[in-house]
Structures are given as C-alpha cells and as structure tokens.
Image (cartoon, rainbow, N blue to C red):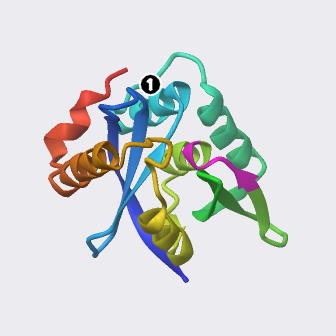
Amino acid sequence: MVVETKVSGIIIDPISNSPVLILKEIGGPRILPIWIGVMEAAAIAAELEHIKFPRPMTHDLIKNIIEKMQCILTKVVITDLRDNTYYANIYLEPKDGEEVVIDSRPSDAVAIALRTGAPIFVSEEVLEKSRAMELFSSIEDEEEREKIRKKWEEILATLSPEDFGKYKM
C-alpha cells in the first residue's frame, strides 16, 4: 500500500548541515525526512520557488524528453529503505504502450514529479522503516544520541511554512 505525500519543503539538518527533503502525508500526520545532496536540493528548491533558468536544467530536460516522447509521468513512489538509502520508481505511461517503471533516487524522482505535476507516493513499508530506523546509530554515547533524537523529533513536530524558507538558491 502507498500513501500520497506532498513536498513540504527543504530544511537544513542542524547537525550535519545537509539538506533534508520533507515529505508530508496528505490528510495525515506522518512526515518523511530524506537527506539529499546539495545539487538535488537546489533543483527541488528552484521548482518550489518558481525559479526559471534561461536553458533547461537536468530535471527540466528530463521533463521535456518525457513530453516529446508523448509519455505521461503518472506517479513517483518511494519504494524502499535499505542500509540508510532510499529507493524510488518513476512510472511513465507511453501514449500507445505499456507502463514503464524506472529506478531513481528519490530526490531526482521528486524534482521531476514537481515539474510534471505528478503525485508523489511513499510505501507504508518505507514509512514504518524510517520511523524505526536508528538515524543516529553512529553516535556511541547513548545520552548524546537520545539528546539528538529528541532535538530532531522537536524540529519535525514543530515545522511551519516559514521554516522552509531556510534553504535558498
């Protein structure tokens, strides 16, 4: 089973200074944070902020190829979480053909979905795994690990729209 989500925005992890893509369950309380690269964050932020470039950037190029091939991007699904790595699929429907599923990094899939208006889904299994995943397992001091975990829980629980202006192009 999959859950439809929307991009709430991108924040910066105060511990690692890495961008974090925040997907929020539509009609529900769950939030999925996905740590992503700086370039992918810039591509997503550019679309969220309606920034247009004079020439197509990579995700714009992919959108243009999809359209020229007369395909429709029907959905993006975050399908798995293994060894702290998220996996996604892009679903394309050719004009006169069978659905095509393409493996993708979630950040790229989301960047393309935002450009095409395609819905973004997350599997229930990924939501459960991410909730149970020990994000801070590399921190050996249990007290310090618990302190950081509580800080993250507080950050995610109190996100507001203003918080998403922190990642700028």
Amino acid type at circle 1 is Lys
Instruction: Return the residue found at the far right.
Output: 97
Magenta-tinted stretch? 103-107
Residue 144 at x, y percent in the picture: 30, 42
Residue 37 at x, y percent in the picture: 54, 31
Classify the position of the N terminus by image quarter: bottom right
Q: Residue at x 76, y 57 (%)?
A: 102
Q: Residue at x 37, y 43 (%)?
A: 141
From this view, report whether residue 104 is shown above or below residue 12: below
Residue 101 figure quarter: bottom right
Q: Residue at x 24, y 46 (%)?
A: 147
Classify the position of the C terminus by image quarter: top left
From this view, report whether residue 21 is shown above or below residue 42: below
23 displayed left or right of 66: left
Query: Closest to the observer: 27 or 147?
Result: 147
Query: Closest to the observer: 98 or 27?
Result: 27
Query: Closest to the observer: 129 or 86?
Result: 129
Residue 105 lies within the magenta run? yes
Q: Secondary structure at mark 1?
A: loop
Query: Closest to the observer: 42 or 87?
Result: 87
Residue that mark 1 sits on: 52
Q: Residues within 10 Å of mark 1 (few under 14, many from 20)?
A: few
96 displayed left or right of 82: right
Residue 164 at x, y percent in the picture: 25, 38
Residue 127 at x, y percent in the picture: 47, 69
Instruction: Return the residue found at the far top.
Output: 54
